[in-house]
């Protein structure tokens, strides 16, 4: 086990990481800023590789990096408790080791299927490779890309909360939360922009 | 008989927590066995929060933190025997398996039932293909316990529902802040002749019982509360622990009820000590000896335990008459953000009109060849978090703009009708013939499909709900159901099994051991020092969430056992 503040041992080699970033950026691509809205980062570029690294390497840490702690992140008051990951029971660890072992194998096989040059391909060629990919891996990668870009940054993705910023989502809000007025009258006296 | 405690309670959810509170208040010593982990509160003084609850979508909706992990405790599902042994294995209506049970993740809507809900057979009559019955108790019998449940849990509400049953007193707290979406949908519903009101909710609107007011964090339904504004069941468990007469044992999976040689009296329970971990091999089997055994594992796990232990089933009713709310999900997208997925509680307004019915609903029933139909409580609420939204859109170039536009999250407002499900003996929980949990026990299997009643009620309500959303300003609306029905439903995003966590009715209460599992005081007919304190005793599902009623029933059962029943106030006591 490593100490929780040390970097995990790599679960993916450099080529696999590069392919993974390209894959996630293909599944959940970037979009430029528009009309005052910030840009949307690609799920890979925004830390998708670190998300998968942390997930597959969860048991390189003690406690395993499966469930972030609580009750607050410190971003909106309170202490930063998210970084204190929760202990798993012995049986929960069995389930998660099993689950992660399956995912690790799926990534090894799936990324190899995409090919080392996947990141160099144009959109059309990437789509062709994706179509040939095992469907279960495509679904797994899409789920993890969504989790990486829009889940809490403590899990390795959503770098600098850029995924949340892109969709104007504050993320966790406790313990401050929202005032009653912000809940019931978010547009103030002007009312909603019909 | 030498015992370790006066009562051993199987399950620490709302029913078990209520029983623990009532027993310890009366001076009994209890042991609460919970098969899941403890993320809720310290089990030693001062019994403070553990701080595990948080605003974390991945932890609560993607990573099973509240359990059960379907790899360890799979369930199976089939719609009927024509499906073969099963069509799905994994998560089936899983309520949290953790200290606090389903109360931990609930958003705390806590309505009472109405008088008619207890007399459905008498008031509405039979329905072919269903087993509609009266309860052996009435609303009046339960009313004082409803009042006690609202006080213990801490319910915020107001008395503006014209269809509500009479009350012996006011709600303990006023309602919390209205969600913005509800400020649009509730007036629209009124304009179309419906009667919305602020939902009775077990989340503090003001400081109450030593816990703070809700901070409107936006992570309510499916999340544990990081500030303990939700009272169910932490308030009850903490009160029990503070007496010094309650011990809670997490990771204790009950697998059997020990009995005297004649089988008529329980002597305690046997459980697997899962805290020993897999390195110990098979979990150690431990025993708690007790004068009373309380089953409170919920309407799925309680029949599973009774069936695997061959107890209480001389009537062949254990597991039968499973009822699950048939959900009608009507959504509308607004031209601006309604903030339903990010601010406030998950639901702040509801309406009962489709339960009460009207001439049009009666006509819809007649047209379908049914004597009557009843819908369910309609919840005016928000959508899910951004990860869930991202999954809906599917991969591709459209994704970033869809997320920014957020028509399925921040611009979406949702009506969920928790439709009444009529009891049918063939809808049931039993033991899967081959699927096993991690410890070799038979998995529970759900066999369930809706009666035509549910489909007709849903089909009637859907267009009304869409009209309300359009009246409120929605640009488009659409209605679906859970479970999905008709056509190819294999890829339905909510799965093939019913998504509602309102699961009731698998150890039915009745007046005769011939056709019920427990008596009117919730004692097993076959073993009278075993009582059931969860929603499995329900005789009808009604269209209301079950939690407050199961808490009230558990309080009644426990108080009858300790010889301290509450007296009824009566409908003339000053409140409707």
Image (spheres, grey):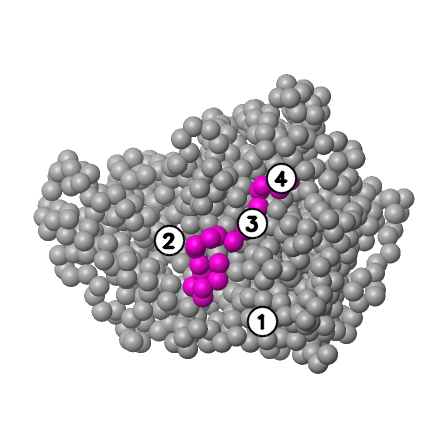
Whether residues under marks 1 and 3 lie with C-beta atoms below 8 angstroms apart, the answer is no
Identify the image quadrant of residue B124: top right
State the image coordinates of residue B559 (x, y, percent, origin top left): 79, 63
Specify the subunit that label 2 lies on.
A
Would residue B436 be counted in the magenta stretch? yes
Would residue B435 be counted in the magenta stretch? yes
Q: Is residue B404 among what the camera can see? A: no
Task: Say which residue label 2 marks.
Answer: A151
Whether residues under marks 4 and 3 lie with C-beta atoms below 8 angstroms apart, the answer is no
Specify the subunit that label 4 lies on.
B
Secondary structure of the residue carrying numbered label 1:
strand
Point out the stretch of residues depicted in magenta: B423-442
The 10 Å Cα crowd at callout 3, few under 14, some 14 to 19, many 20 or more, is many
Q: Residue furthest bottom?
A: B2
Which of the image's four quarters has the N terminus of chain B? bottom right
Specify the subunit that label 3 lies on.
B
Whether residues under marks 2 and 1 lie with C-beta atoms below 8 angstroms apart, the answer is no
Q: Nearer the viewer, residue A169 or B150?
A: B150
Secondary structure of the residue carrying numbered label 4:
loop
Task: Say which residue label 4 marks.
Answer: B424
Q: CA distance from mark 2 to mark 4?
A: 42 Å
User: Residue A76 bears which disc, if any?
Assistant: none
User: Residue B270 bears which disc, if any?
Assistant: 1
Q: CA distance from mark 2 to mark 1?
A: 41 Å
Q: Nearer the viewer, mark 2 or mark 1?
A: 1
Q: CA distance from mark 4 to mark 3?
A: 12 Å
């Amino acid at each position: 086990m490593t100490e929780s503040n040390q970097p995990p041992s790599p679960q993916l080699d450099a080529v696999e990481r590069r392919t993974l970033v390209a894959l996630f950026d293909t599944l959940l691509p970037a979009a430029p800023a528009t009309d005052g809205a910030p840009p949307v980062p690609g799920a890979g570029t925004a830390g998708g590789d670190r998300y998968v690294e942390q997930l597959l390497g969860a048991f390189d840490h003690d406690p395993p990096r499966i469930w972030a702690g609580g009750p607050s992140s410190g971003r909106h008051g309170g202490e930063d408790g998210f970084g204190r990951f929760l202990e798993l029971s012995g049986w929960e660890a069995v389930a998660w080791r099993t689950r992660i072992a399956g995912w690790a194998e799926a990534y090894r096989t799936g990324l190899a299927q995409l090919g080392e040059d996947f990141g160099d391909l144009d959109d059309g060629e990437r789509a062709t490779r994706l179509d040939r990919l095992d469907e279960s891996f495509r679904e797994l990668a899409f789920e993890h890309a969504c989790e990486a870009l829009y889940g809490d940054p403590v899990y390795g993705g959503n770098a600098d909360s850029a995924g949340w910023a892109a969709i104007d989502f504050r993320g966790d809000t406790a313990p401050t939360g929202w005032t009653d007025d912000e809940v019931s009258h978010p547009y103030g006296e002007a009312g909603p922009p019909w | 008989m030498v015992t370790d405690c006066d009562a051993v309670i199987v399950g620490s959810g709302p029913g078990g927590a209520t029983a623990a509170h009532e027993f310890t208040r009366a001076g009994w010593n209890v042991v609460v066995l919970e098969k899941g982990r403890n993320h809720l509160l310290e089990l030693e003084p001062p019994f403070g929060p553990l701080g595990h609850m948080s605003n974390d979508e991945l932890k609560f909706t993607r990573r099973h933190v509240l359990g059960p992990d379907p790899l360890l405790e799979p369930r199976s599902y089939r719609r009927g025997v024509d499906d073969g042994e099963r069509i799905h294995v994994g998560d089936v209506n899983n309520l949290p398996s953790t200290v606090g049970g389903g109360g931990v993740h609930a958003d705390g809507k806590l309505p009472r039932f109405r008088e008619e809900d207890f007399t459905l057979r008498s008031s509405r009559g039979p329905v072919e293909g269903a087993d509609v019955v009266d309860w052996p108790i009435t609303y009046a019998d339960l009313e004082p316990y409803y009042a006690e449940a609202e006080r213990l849990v801490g319910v915020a509400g107001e008395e503006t529902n014209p269809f509500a049953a009479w009350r012996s007193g006011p709600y303990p707290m006023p309602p919390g802040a209205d969600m913005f979406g509800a400020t649009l949908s509730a007036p629209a519903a009124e304009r179309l002749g419906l009667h919305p009101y602020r939902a009775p909710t077990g989340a503090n609107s003001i400081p109450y019982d030593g816990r703070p007011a809700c901070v409107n964090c936006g992570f309510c339904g499916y999340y544990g509360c990081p500030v303990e504004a939700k009272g169910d069941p932490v308030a009850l468990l903490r009160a029990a622990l503070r007496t010094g007469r309650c011990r809670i044992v997490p990771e204790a999976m009950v697998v059997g009820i020990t009995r005297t040689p004649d089988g008529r009296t329980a002597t305690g329970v046997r459980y697997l000590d899962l805290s020993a971990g897999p390195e110990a091999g098979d979990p150690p089997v431990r025993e708690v000896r007790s004068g009373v055994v309380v089953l409170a594992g919920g309407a799925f796990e309680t029949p599973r335990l009774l069936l695997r232990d061959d107890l209480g089933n001389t009537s062949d009713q254990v597991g039968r008459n499973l009822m699950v709310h048939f959900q009608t999900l009507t959504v509308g997208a607004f031209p601006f953000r309604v903030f339903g997925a990010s601010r406030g509680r998950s639901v702040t307004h509801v309406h009962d009109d489709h339960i009460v019915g009207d001439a049009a609903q009666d006509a819809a029933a007649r047209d379908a060849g049914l004597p009557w139909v009843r819908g369910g409580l309609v919840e005016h609420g928000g959508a899910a978090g951004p990860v869930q939204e991202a999954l809906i859109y599917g991969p591709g170039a459209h994704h970033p703009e869809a997320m920014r536009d957020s028509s399925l999250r921040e611009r979406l407002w949702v009506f969920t009708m928790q439709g009444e499900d009529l009891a049918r003996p063939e809808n049931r929980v039993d033991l899967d013939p081959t699927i096993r949990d991690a410890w070799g026990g038979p998995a529970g299997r759900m066999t369930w499909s809706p009666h035509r009643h549910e489909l007709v009620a849903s089909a009637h309500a859907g267009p009304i709900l869409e009209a309300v959303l359009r009246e409120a300003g929605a640009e488009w609306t659409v209605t679906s159901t859970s479970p999905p029905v008709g056509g190819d439903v294999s890829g339905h995003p909510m799965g093939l099994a019913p998504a509602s966590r309102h699961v009731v009715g698998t150890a039915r209460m009745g007046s005769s051991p011939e056709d019920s599992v427990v008596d009117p005081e919730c004692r097993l007919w076959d073993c009278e020092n075993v009582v059931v304190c969860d929603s499995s005793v329900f005789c009808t599902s009604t269209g209301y969430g079950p939690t407050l009623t199961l808490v009230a029933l558990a309080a009644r059962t426990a108080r009858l056992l300790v010889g301290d029943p509450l007296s009824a106030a009566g409908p003339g006591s000053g409140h409707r």
